[in-house]
Amino acid sequence: MSELLLKNARIVDPVRNIDEVGDIAIADGVIVDAAALKSPEVIDLTGKVLSPGFIDVHVHLRQPGNTNAETIASGTAAAAAGGFTSIVAMPNTSPSADTAGAIEYIRQIADAQGVVKVLPCGNMTKGGKGEEMAGIGSLKNAGVVALSDDGKCIQDHGLMRHVVEYAKSFDLPILDHCEESTLAAGGVMNEGKWSVLLGMNGIPGASEELIIARNIIFAREINWKIHMQHVSTRDSVDMIRRARAKGIPVTGEATPHHLSLTDECVKKFDTNYKMNPPLRSEDDRQALIEGIADGTITVIATDHAPHTQTAKLVEFDHAPFGIIGLETALPVCFTQLVVPGIISIPQLIAKLTAGPAEVLGVKDYSLAIGNAADITVFDPEAEYVIDKNTFRSKARNTPFDGMKVRGKINLTVVDGKIVYREGC
Ligand code: DOR
Ligand code: ZN
């Protein structure tokens, strides 16, 4: 029987509204009463923060199809190093995760080689092409936790409405990449002052906002959950705020990069500032922060999007969209949001635990006795410089290399097993 006693940590458990110094006992993969332990391994966590394991609802693992950029093994190792114990794997692999067979394949590799829990997400449409609905019932039977065509967005509103109805009947949340494609076509960065100055084609905020408006209408009409991925503009945040106030079942996520960077960064012509949706204006960034602070945005997700160096080392116009994020999420968000006093440590933890759990329909994602021992520990005082060469990810496409940050992951535990340990 494997036993672990995590002592003297600041335990933050948002679902149960707990924030107190104490111990967490683990036996056989679950949280138990400390009195039940016989001869546990003891780890002293004085000064460290302990919480339920972080959940990232937006991760690209690239397997099958682009294992030069990432694999399920390397991506889950990166997740563990970032404090994530569960990650939702986006279906835009090659082939797409649009059939039961594809989901079964991912689950087998994840079981054999994954170090954290891989929760597969299935496509809404065949091949993510937005033309024909995928076999949603068989995806559900194969074990998907959600549906998404991330990377793309269903443009046919009739088809989308039909998908939302099916998703509801199979009890699957929709995670939508909100992008109207005629407005976004040909764009490589945010449409605004900087795209004009740099002479680059812009992607207007309206491209995202049109689809967010559509999704709010369908969520209300069908009364089903639609989660807006990587929300990036002020008007998107405003619409989600108003919809939630009316009780419409929509949620939104913000990425660490949209919370910390703006389109001005593109003047460096570094393709590690190219992602979709693009970095927006400072006003949009402030609106996202307001949405995080007032509870409109309940989820922080990374959109971890690995690309090889060869793919990214081209002119800005030609580079693929996307940056990695699993190993920088906690320090970037801690530094940007907690250090300046915008949100508290429990609020940040909620965006990485209870918020994503709620999107997935997981009840009681907490440290209650009897629950799976999925746990994250970090040091809120540790200051250091991000070094991409230390990453577990195969990819290096990050804009955060060299950034001075505070907040360091020390321990990641999945089902009672230590999958990452550093400095404790
Ligand atoms: O920047 C992005 N990269 N945005 C997406 O929506 C897809 C992702 C990818 O798969 O590379
Ligand atoms: Zn996306």
Image (tube, rainbow, N blue to C red):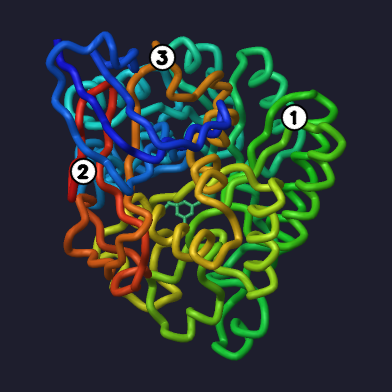
Considering only vertical position in the picture, is 343 above or below 44?
A: below
Q: Which residue is mark 1?
A: 161
Instruction: Give the mark nearer the N terminus: 3 vs 2.
Output: 2
Task: Give residue 236's quadrant in the image.
Answer: bottom right
Q: Which residue is mark 3?
A: 369
Mark 3 and mark 2: Cα distance apart in space: 31 Å
Q: Where does residue 238 sit, x and y in percent of width and height?
A: 79, 55
Q: The N terminus lies in which quarter of the figure? A: top left
Residue at horizontal 46%, vertical 42%? 58
**Residue 74, label in figure:** 2
Viewer-side residue, 54 vs 161: 54
The three-letter amino acid code for the residue at tag 2 is Ser
Residue at horizontal 80%, vertical 24%? 222
Task: Give residue 319's quadrant in the image.
Answer: bottom left
The answer, for residue 151, to whether it is visible in the render is no
The answer, for residue 212, to whether it is visible in the render is yes
Q: Where does residue 314 sit, x and y in percent of width and height?
A: 32, 75
